[in-house]
Image (cartoon, rainbow, N blue to C red):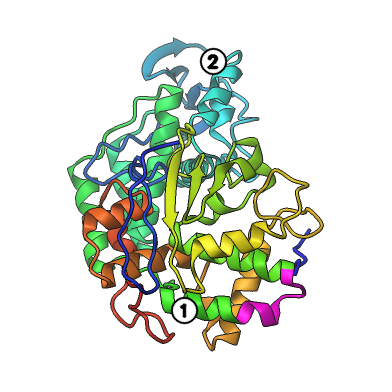
Amino acid sequence: MPVQESPCCASDRVPGPSSCSVGGAADQQHSERASVVSASEPVAVGGGATGTSADVVVAGRGVTVVERPSVASLEVVSGGISVPVEGPSVSVSSAGARGSRGRFSDAGAFVEPGREGVWEMLRLSVAPATWTHYSTGFRVVSAFLFSRGCVPGDVAESFLEDFVLDSSRAEVSKRVVQGRLAGFAFFCRALGWNCPSSGFIVRRLLRAMGRVVPARPDSRLPIHHDLLIQLLSVLPDLAHSPYESALFRAAFSLAFFGALRVGELLVSASDRARGRGLLVQHVLLGDSEVRICVASSKTDQAGRGQWLVLHQVVGCVSCPVARLSEYLSVRVAVSSEFFVHADGAPLSRFQFLAVLRLALVRCGEEPRSYGTHSFRIGAATSASAAGMSEAGIRRLGRWVSGAFRGYIRPSGASRGRGGSSMGL
């Protein structure tokens, strides 16, 4: 049912009862790479040279010049060193550092000539989403500093305090502010700027933001086990062919029992280049279990990989072994991607979500309350409701920190029926 879209590690079995249950998963994944820097950690963020209201601040590539029209003595600030310069008034072009509207388009504009290769390797050291996140933080903080007469470089911590205060008044969340500071800090360190650490006032301002406006809880609802069964039951009626029904039933079952992120399940063009997503060679199907290799993921950029072992659940429509066996019996062998349509085209994230929403509507659910991550949330929630230990839940979702607690929803969080049944 193609939907048109717009222009390896030790395993750990989780015991289950005689009824429907979830299989086990492997352990160990390092903490979320793209998480923002904690307010308690040093957050180095840069700014620029400042002056009186009569000063004109312009920027070159990695060099900040403060021009005082009434004074012949100038200061060039470069690499954290201030050097007095005697001579007539000068003007340094800001081309490449700022856009036509005074916005800094990219921290790379400040990279010294000849170091472009280093910058490219720096970009490859983090996930693309993290690089984008950090770049946004750099631009936002830079724009604020520029509005105060500064350009990126060395800056007094008072400007960071002003940034936090201004963000708070604009009702920007604490988490967003921390993320922006973290992004700016990343590029300041990369450029060798002497950025101030997160001082006492900045930390207290951030803490105040969290107290005055608490973080909004994740509103996405979990797809618990009972709801999964409903979804799998309606898919044959929604699918255009038995092949499409088997495809989506296998994908939904694996997403839940493996507590997988959609990026670990499906393969996009960008994922293929980075070795992410599920390929044929990553799936080993046995008589009573299926082994899945998560070759690379959001928190495993190095591609060390982890093996998940999902066990058979006899007599259960959601059984991952049964669903994968059904799909593999009809799968066309024309592509390396594991989940493909009958014509060989890979199943996309857009199609996965579109069919999920159609199935949710058929089950009487509000589709806007769910997302692709709802399977992962549902796995953690159902495991907790079934009495699984924290250590077991962490193994299930491959968490190495307490982040898993944010995935566990209170009883009755789902609008569906039987929200806590998973039978572990």
Nearer to us in this view, 364 or 45: 364
CA–CA distance between discs 2 and 1? Answer: 75 Å
Q: What is the x, y in percent for residue 37? A: 32, 43
Observer-side mark, 2 or 1, equals 1
Q: Count numbered badges in the picture.
A: 2
* N-terminal-most mark, 2 or 1: 2
Q: Quadrant of the C terminus?
A: bottom left
Residue in the image at 58% along x and 59% along y: 324
Q: Is residue 262 above or below residue 283?
A: below
Is residue 343 left or right of 174 when viewed as pictured?
right
Q: Residues within 10 Å of mark 1 (few under 14, many from 20)?
A: many
Residue in the image at 36% along x and 36% along y: 45
Q: Which residue is mark 2?
A: 88
Residue in the image at 46% along x and 64% along y: 256
Dominant SS type (magenta): helix
Whether residue 114 appears in magenta in the rendering, the answer is no
Whether residue 239 appears in magenta in the rendering, the answer is yes
- Circle 2 — which element? loop
Q: What is the x, y in percent for residue 421? A: 34, 77
Q: Is residue 66 above or below residue 167?
A: above
- Disc 2 marks which amino acid? Pro
Q: Which residue is mark 1?
A: 227
Which contiguous range is marked in magenta? 234-242
Q: Quadrant of the N terminus?
A: bottom right
Is residue 148 visible in the rendered structure shown here?
Answer: no
Residue in the image at 77% along x and 75% along y: 240
- Disc 1 marks which amino acid? Leu
- Circle 1 — which element? helix
Find out whether the residues at labels 2 and 1 contact each other: C-beta distance under 8 Å.
Answer: no
Is residue 255 visible in the rendered structure shown here?
Answer: yes
Q: What is the x, y in percent for residue 148? A: 43, 44
